[in-house]
Amino acid sequence: MAKILIVDDEPRIRELIREHLQYAGFTCEEATDGSAALAQLSGGGFDLVILDIMMPFMDGMTCLREMRSRKILTPVIMLTARSEEYDKLAGLEGGADDYVVKPFSPRELVARVKAVLNRTMPRSEQAAGTMSFGALSIDVASHSVRVDGQEVSLTPKEFDLLVFLASNKGLALSREKILQKVWNYDYFGEDRTVDTHVKMLRSHLGSCRDDISTVWGIGYKFDPDSAKPQP
């Protein structure tokens, strides 16, 4: 069963989350701030992190940025007492996979945890193979992406988004469909979540960023052929 790190400076919140996750069958460890979380994560072994934003010593956003800069790609669900769109987008653009606004329903949090883990575990069960589209190469088995021969670093969610889009080459995919297939839920989540991750994914793809086109009023399409100039 998956091992989850709960990072929050409030003991009551950690206990609440731990009880519900353990009841759902997960193994949990706890940390009281971002610095402690980084120390535990450096040893590996965690499948997901539940990370509070507002903490002393090292806040959640700083911890998340440090995780990603160290290439710790463990999926992250952010906890925030703020509901403003800016804070949500800041977390997603920083590399978070999802967010939950306090006060939250423990059942909703468990559902979001399962959704993220269903998408990221186990990698060995995903279809193997390599997809190539000109300068873009996606190796599903090794979870690697190359653009013009250079490997690019993607978060697990960015990688799964790219694989889903590429696997449906030429098809216009609605934001709702992308949420269902990539995030594995259809009630939780917002259209803006998809937009934010597409924006981040394009920023990593360099010369292949236009392989993902916007279909106005619908969503997105992976169409590398139309992105290339015609002879």
Image (cartoon, grey):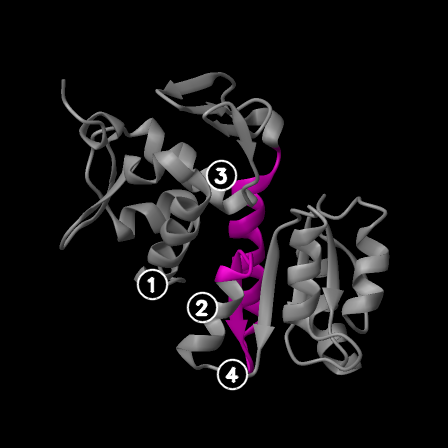
For the magenta stretch, what is the residue range?
93-122
Q: Which mark is residue 82?
A: 4
Q: Secondary structure at mark 2?
A: helix
Residue position for label 2 = 89
Q: Secondary structure at mark 1?
A: helix
Q: Locate residue 164: give its quadrant.
A: top left
Q: Would residue 154 be found to the left or right of residue 187 on screen? A: right
Amino acid residing under circle 4: Arg
User: 54 or 224: which is nearer to us?
Assistant: 224
Percent across and percent down for residue 178 are 33, 46
**Going from the N terminus, do you reach mark 3 or mark 2 first?**
2
Residue 88 visible in the picture: yes
Amino acid residing under circle 2: Leu
Q: Which mark is residue 192?
A: 1
Percent across and percent down for residue 27 are 77, 53
**Going from the N terminus, do you reach mark 3 or mark 4 first?**
4
Q: Nearer the viewer, mark 2 or mark 4?
A: 2
Contact flag, marks 2 and 1 (Cβ < 8 Å): yes
**Going from the N terminus, do you reach mark 4 or mark 1 first?**
4
